[in-house]
Image (tube, rainbow, N blue to C red):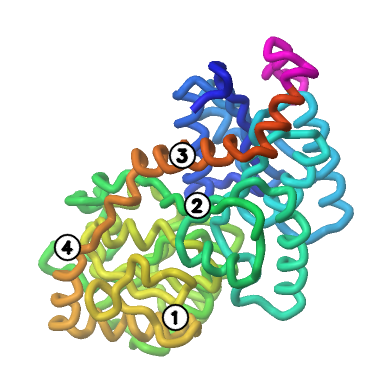
């Protein structure tokens, strides 16, 4: 994948880059792959990002802060972010701008259009207009319809999100592709228990291991930890030999810690924070859960299955692409997070059903979610976008105006 024999200049835009998030891991892996393939890669992220963390990971990717880009809706901040990014793009002069998630997708695509970027690609990691209030749904649908005409290609994490965009008639003139999120599948197969497993579970011997439910998710409202923990507390009793482990960090940490204390479930609910060994947590667990209100196709569910444990999940758009009810997991009948908790508790209390679903997990096809597969699909998607007649015309105009040699990717003035 190149442009007239030269490497590409690619700019990725993400609303926020925090540690441990699925979309963040996906974006970063894409950046690394493209940089390792010889392209010049820039990553622009909003003010809620852990910029220092990502700047420290690799010298091949130029990471930039967009101070005004925040996750919440704010006309004033959003307009400022639009102007900041347009100026940055005019300096970087990317061949492709690839936006990710909702806010960055709207603001970033508008900025790319203003800066005259030849190819604009949007990555759909989540459905912003799914399972929301009517006003929010209308706002996001209106915004998506407004920027769809300037989008050359959409990359979806699942067939479910692609179908949802088709039903909403978003991006009818653009090309669409499905690219599975990449991850280190092999790391989850046959992983060892974490070194501190005894402290986590509060036991001294493997024979004493209680039935264990694991939720790996950022501690934010969309993941619905509050409702899940409350339902778990109602479905279990004090001192019961069962554990709920919550891996992840985020703005809800203090709130959830207080809730656990108020519900008096600290004996069986553990906040683990950010862990570098998620595969080890999966290896120790019996069931993996996710009660999110909105997702694309959650990477963590694939990781549960790769690690050999069944998944209990809310009825997300496209989730049946990976979770087969009554074969390798359970999809809750409604979008009530409490029902997900009740189903998970029921499952770990039923050894016959748990054994049957665990056996079905072994046949789950998860090889589509390898990094190698994702890289190949991304490259193919970019090639499709670059072959669009309108994109080819824009690229030709830019090259005639500036010349290939004029493309200077260094923007030291924007670092910091």
Work out whether mark 4 precedes mark 2 in sequence or the reverse, and give the earlier one. 2
Mark 1 sits on what residue?
264
What's the CA distance linking mark 2 and mark 3? Answer: 9 Å
What's the CA distance linking mark 4 and mark 1? Answer: 36 Å
Say the numbered circle drawn on residue 380: 3
Q: Are marks 2 and 3 in contact (CB under 8 Å)?
A: yes
Mark 2 sits on what residue?
177
Q: Is residue 271 above or below residue 35?
A: below
Mark 4 sits on what residue?
362
| Closer mark to the observer between disc 1 and disc 2 | 2
Residue at image location 57% in from the left, 36% down from the top: 387
Say the numbered circle drawn on residue 349: none
Residue at image location 48% in from the left, 75% down from the top: 260
Circle 2: element type: strand
| Closer mark to the observer between disc 1 and disc 3 | 3
Q: Which residues are magenta?
A: 399-416
């Amino acid at each position: 994948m190149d442009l007239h024999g030269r490497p590409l200049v690619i700019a990725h835009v993400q609303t926020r880059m925090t540690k441990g998030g699925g979309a963040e891991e996906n974006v970063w892996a894409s950046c690394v792959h493209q940089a390792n393939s010889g392209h010049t890669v820039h990553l622009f992220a909003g003010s809620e990002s852990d910029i220092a963390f990502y700047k420290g990971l690799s010298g091949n990717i130029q990471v930039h802060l967009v101070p005004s880009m925040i996750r919440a809706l704010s006309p004033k901040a959003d307009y400022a972010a639009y102007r900041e990014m347009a100026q940055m793009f005019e300096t970087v002069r990317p061949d492709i701008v690839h936006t990710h998630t909702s806010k960055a997708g709207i603001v970033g695509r508008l900025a790319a259009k203003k800066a005259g970027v030849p190819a604009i690609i949007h990555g759909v990691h989540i459905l912003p207009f799914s399972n929301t209030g009517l006003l929010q749904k209308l706002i996001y649908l209106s915004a998506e319809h407004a920027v769809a005409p300037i989008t050359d290609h959409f990359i979806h994490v699942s067939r479910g999100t692609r179908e949802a965009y088709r039903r909403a008639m978003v991006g009818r003139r653009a090309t669409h592709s499905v690219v599975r999120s990449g991850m280190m599948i092999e790391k989850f197969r046959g992983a060892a228990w974490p070194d501190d497993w005894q402290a986590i579970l509060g036991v001294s011997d493997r024979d004493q291991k209680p039935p264990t439910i694991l939720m790996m998710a950022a501690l934010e409202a969309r993941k619905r930890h509050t409702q899940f923990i409350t339902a778990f507390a109602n479905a279990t009793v004090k001192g019961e030999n069962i554990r709920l482990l919550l891996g992840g960090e985020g703005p809800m940490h203090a709130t959830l810690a207080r809730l656990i204390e108020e519900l008096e479930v600290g004996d069986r609910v553990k906040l683990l924070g950010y862990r570098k060994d998620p595969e080890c947590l999966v290896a120790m667990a019996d069931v993996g859960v996710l009660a999110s209100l909105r997702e694309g196709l959650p990477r963590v569910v694939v990781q549960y299955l790769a690690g050999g444990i069944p998944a209990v999940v809310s009825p997300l758009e496209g989730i049946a692409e990976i979770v087969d009810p009554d074969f390798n997991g359970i999809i809750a009948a409604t979008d009530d997070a409490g029902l997900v908790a009740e189903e998970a508790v029921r499952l770990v209390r039923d050894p016959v059903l748990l054994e049957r679903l665990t056996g079905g997990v072994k046949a789950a096809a998860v090889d589509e979610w390898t990094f190698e597969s994702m890289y190949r699909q991304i490259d193919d998607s970019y090639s499709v976008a670059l072959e669009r007649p309108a994109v080819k015309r824009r690229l030709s105009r830019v090259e005639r105006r500036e010349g290939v040699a004029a493309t200077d990717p260094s923007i030291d003035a924007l670092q910091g």
